[in-house]
Image (tube, helix red, strand yellow):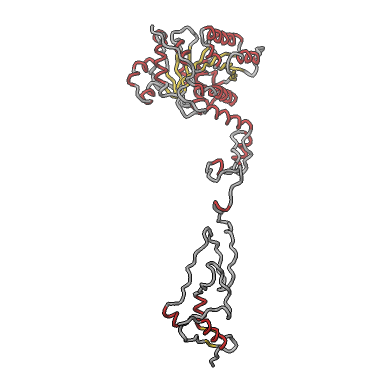
Amino acid sequence: MEARDDTGAERGAGDAAPGASESSPVTTATPGAPATDRSESSAAAAPVSSTDEPPGAAAAPDSPDTTRRVDTAEAARGDAAQPRPFAPRVGAAPTGRVAGPPGSPPPADRAPVSGRFTTPGRGAGVPPAGGPSTDDLSSAHLLRPSKRPPQTGWRRALFVGSGGLINPGESLGDAARRELIARVNQPLHGCYKIAMLSLKGGVGKTTMTTTLGSTFASLRGDRVIAVDANPDRGTLSQKIPLETTATVRHLLRDADRVRRYSDVRAYTSQGPSRLEILASEQDPAVSEAFSEVDYRRTVTLLEHFYNVVLTDCGTGLMHSAMKGVLDVADSLLIVSSASIDGARSASATLDWLDAHGYRDLVSRSVAVINYVRRSSGNVDLDRVSDHFAARCRAVVRLPFDPHLEEGAEIELDKLAARTRSALLELAATVADDFGRAGSRVRRPVLPR
């Protein structure tokens, strides 16, 4: 059965514009349901905004009083107003909301929620003032702080026994050793030259040269060499396994052909610690001809390939090569024994240097009291140390060690723990002066 909506027909006729089609929309009614216009479904699918409303004004909800009728013929001809394309608001970000049913109010915008695998971007917040920068990708910023594994003692045994699950941290001794190693590895620009001096023989200059050089070579990544400048048949070459019979005299003879490190390496012997030794002539008559100019030529050649050069000097300060040794040295090691005559000889060495214009070198020197036993008799070593501390930059005591007393080839692994700790402290003390390498005013070479 068809039912006519007179009210709707009269309203549609009144709203029709002049010249519009006189055909009226056909409505159908279903029992128990309100009458519905066929064109209303098209109007709902493509809403038309009235031209009488200002742009941007929200349309009123659909009602029988406000619904605009669209003629079917007009829709077929394409004369009906088309819906405006959707234009998102400027600056609006996707909210991920789900649209509701047609005609329902839009849900409120919600900010993106960071879940388990989602990290808010830069716009989510600003890092607090004084906090770490988000651009910092250094290891110290990205890695979680952890305890350093212990290296010695029961802490090490517990760490190893638990498979690394229990880490009590390093002991105070391990931390002190790590700090000393860091001092030994201070950056060194150029070549640093150290001379071992003493007016008294038998105090351990050659042993000190080998042990200190071995400590530097085993901890630092650069090259370290020891030169035997003792005119009285030096024994420096006997402290490491001998690889060649070449001496400093052969190196000077072939100096014009030396271009690379491998060329110099043919004249040196290297020990297990990577310390290299340049031996002297074993014949005292030949070695006496090793003059100041020869020593300067040797050091000038070596400093192009090595970062640390140690010189084992003889007991004679008036030797022809001694002036060259003192002029090019950056630092001195004054070696003394733990006896009274050894301390007096070392002090006399400092007096001679002060009297001959090397006061600046004395102030940069380090005194070493060698072969200190647990019981040194009636000698007050504290007063001996105070005497040298007033004249030198530092004083280090090296304890007695059975391996060094043998007089054979020296291996650091065979030294007692106390001896290795004292050598590490000595190397760190010497390395504290690495920043002033080459800062001394060199004296010119006088022609002979």
Residue farthest bottom in this picture: 1
Residue farthest left in this picture: 257
| Residue at x-position 50% and y-position 9% | 315
Front-lying residue, 40 or 22: 22
Front-lying residue, 7 or 392: 7
Front-lying residue, 291 or 58: 58
Residue 409 x %, y %: 49, 21
Residue 245 left/right relative to 411: left
Residue farthest front in this picture: 18
- The quadrant the N terminus occupies is bottom right
- The quadrant the C terminus occupies is top left
Quarter of the image where one finds residue 231: top left
Residue 41 x %, y %: 51, 79
For residue 257, above or below residue 147: above
Quarter of the image where one finds residue 160: top right
Residue 154 x %, y %: 63, 35
For residue 191, above or below residue 140: above
For residue 118, above or below residue 183: below
Total marks shown come to: 0
Residue 404 x %, y %: 54, 20
